[in-house]
Amino acid sequence: MFKILKIALFILICLGVFSDVPSVLALSVSTNISEKYTEIQAGERLYFEIDIKYPENPKRKDLQLNYEITKDNEIIAQSKVLKAIETQASFLDFIVIPESSNTGLYHLNIKISDYENLSEEVSTSFHVIGNKNQQLKVYFFILLGVISLVVILVTVNIIISKKKLPLRNPVPKG
């Protein structure tokens, strides 16, 4: 009898200790940039896919998604979105790369949080290449420089060739 009482007391203590443990909800987030958008021009939209898995969520929940484009830990662009999910969600979204962005390696940071204590962050990278308009301007100035050089060379050639022409001597009348 005393042994049964010890076991019952042990079970009650264990239940009391473990019932005070707060529940931990698991949130898994992943992101992917399609190969088509790993190199993008400044001024265009960067499309990316987000997978959210929230298996222990018993009901629909609003999550705040904060998108940030950074380069060298400096925020270049930012966007906030509110999404309601249940246990999982997968969707495409985008953020516009500013036209003033220089070429180089950039990072897309996605922070997901609820209005309580749940938070998760994921990051991926991509390259920004030159803007089409900037490339056209460069080509225009190169073409303008070549045309100007040709005009200068032709003008100098005409001036030099006029100086080298011998003067015509009038034919004596006789």
Image (tube, helix red, strand yellow):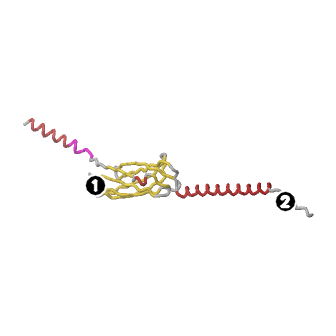
Residue positioned most to the top: 2
| Rendered location of residue 146, percent (x, y) | 64, 55
Point out the stretch of residues depicted in magenta.
16-22
Q: Quadrant of residue 139?
A: bottom right
Q: Closer to the camera, 7 or 160? A: 160
Q: Give the residue number, with chain letter if any, for mark 1.
A: 87
- Amino acid carrying mark 1 in the image: Thr
Dot 2, crowdedness within 10 Å: few (<14), some or many (≥20)?
few
| Rendered location of residue 77, percent (x, y) | 47, 54
Q: Closer to the camera, 128 or 149? A: 149
Marks 1 and 2, how far apart at CA: 100 Å
| Rendered location of residue 75, percent (x, y) | 48, 50
Q: Give the residue number, with chain letter if any, for mark 2.
A: 168
- Amino acid carrying mark 2 in the image: Arg
Residue 66 located left or right of residue 15:
right
Instruction: Identify the residue shown where x is 71% and y is 57%.
Output: 154
Residue 130 located left or right of residue 52:
right
Instruction: Indicate the quadrant containing the C terminus: top left, top right, bottom left or bottom right.
Output: bottom right
Q: Closer to the camera, 136 or 51? A: 136
